[in-house]
Image: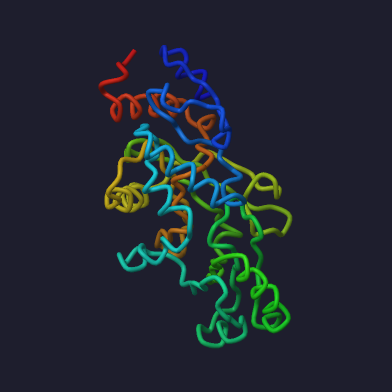
């Protein structure tokens, strides 16, 4: 839908895999990174491609520095330092020794979500509790041999309230959806049976997400802020700046908002139609 809308505004779209070495990236006015859902499986190759795009002087949206920052959930440490409301978590560095039973004991959590720090689409994401922590610790240790891992307190409101996704273009609010898990699962992605519905959050929630994006020192063609309403507080779960679904089919103005943001970021290359 988005590509068709841009084509209707006389913007020529060419789809190309990021790891296609035959592509001459310098011929494009801009490269919009979308649907790169395999980057977490080929991280070294992906970052080498980012470095190449930077060296060629190409306009990449979102910019390479923000993509490198956002690809590892270690960015949550920066958000926590900035006093952003996020669920408590423990960051475990690659090849470190971590015991789930100790993490539960020290933090007094009843349940936690374990996920690779570099992942997308709930890849290799699972739940543990104090009762299964000893049994689950070897699985955590195995993950740490491959990369960094986040152990995060489970937010039960995900199950009954769902997860909000607020979509912004050029840091301006566009629209929102709510994603709900089904069948007893905690994961809200469609491939796990999750459903998506349009929703209009309160101004307080929108302003909270907008303030978070305003503090990021890079231009953002697109951004998705995922969070949960826990009590009366909007708690940030993820900040998606690389490959998020933008749910343009759920809002009549979404494609127009994206186009206007693109024109605003590339004023010397595009004109409003």
Residue at (39%, 27%) from the top-left corner?
Answer: 30
Residue 83 location in percent, x, y? 31, 67
The image position of residue 136, as x and y in percent, is 70, 77
Q: Which residue is drawn at 59% across and 72% down?
A: 112
Question: Percent from the top left, x then y, of residue 199?
Answer: 49, 41
Camera-side residue of 61 and 52: 52
Apparent side of residue 159 relative to residue 10 in the rendered image (left or right): right
- Please report the residue visible at 50 percent of the width from the left and 37 percent of the height from the top: 246
Quadrant where the N terminus sits is top right
Quarter of the image containing the C terminus? top left
Q: How many circles with numbers are drawn on the protein?
A: 0
The residue lying toward the viewer, choosing from 143 and 220, is 143
**How was this image coloured?**
rainbow
Q: In this view, does 15 lie to the left or right of 84?
A: right
Name the one closer to the observer, 219 or 110: 219
- Measuring 58% from the left and 81% from the top, which residue is drawn there? 97
Quick check: 65 above or below 229? above
Residue 37 drawn at (x, y percent): 59, 43
Asked if residue 6 is positioned above or below residue 111 in the image, the reply reads above
């Amino acid at each position: 839908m988005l590509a068709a809308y841009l084509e209707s505004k006389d913007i020529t779209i060419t789809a190309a895999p990021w790891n296609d070495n035959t592509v001459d990236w310098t011929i494009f006015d801009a490269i919009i990174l979308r649907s790169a859902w395999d980057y977490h499986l080929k991280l070294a190759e992906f970052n080498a491609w980012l470095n190449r795009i930077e060296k060629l002087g190409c306009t990449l949206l979102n910019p390479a520095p923000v993509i490198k920052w956002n690809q590892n959930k270690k960015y949550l440490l920066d958000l926590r330092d900035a006093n952003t409301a996020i669920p408590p978590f423990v960051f475990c560095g690659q090849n470190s020794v971590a015991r789930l039973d100790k993490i539960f004991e020290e933090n007094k959590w009843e349940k936690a979500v374990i996920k690779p720090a570099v992942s997308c689409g709930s890849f290799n994401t699972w739940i543990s509790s104090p009762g299964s922590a000893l049994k689950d610790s070897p699985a955590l240790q195995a993950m740490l041999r491959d990369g960094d891992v986040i152990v995060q307190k489970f937010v039960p409101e995900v199950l009954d309230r769902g997860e909000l996704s607020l979509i912004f273009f050029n840091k301006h609010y566009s629209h929102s959806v709510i994603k709900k898990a089904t069948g007893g699962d905690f994961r809200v992605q469609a491939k796990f049976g999750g459903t998506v519905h349009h929703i209009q959050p309160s101004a307080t929630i929108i302003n909270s997400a907008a303030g978070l994006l305003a503090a990021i020192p890079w231009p953002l063609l697109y951004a998705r802020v995922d969070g949960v309403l826990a009590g009366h507080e909007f708690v940030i779960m993820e900040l998606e700046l690389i490959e998020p679904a933008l749910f343009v089919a759920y809002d009549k103005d979404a494609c127009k908002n994206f186009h206007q943001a693109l024109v605003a970021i590339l004023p010397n290359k595009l004109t409003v139609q």
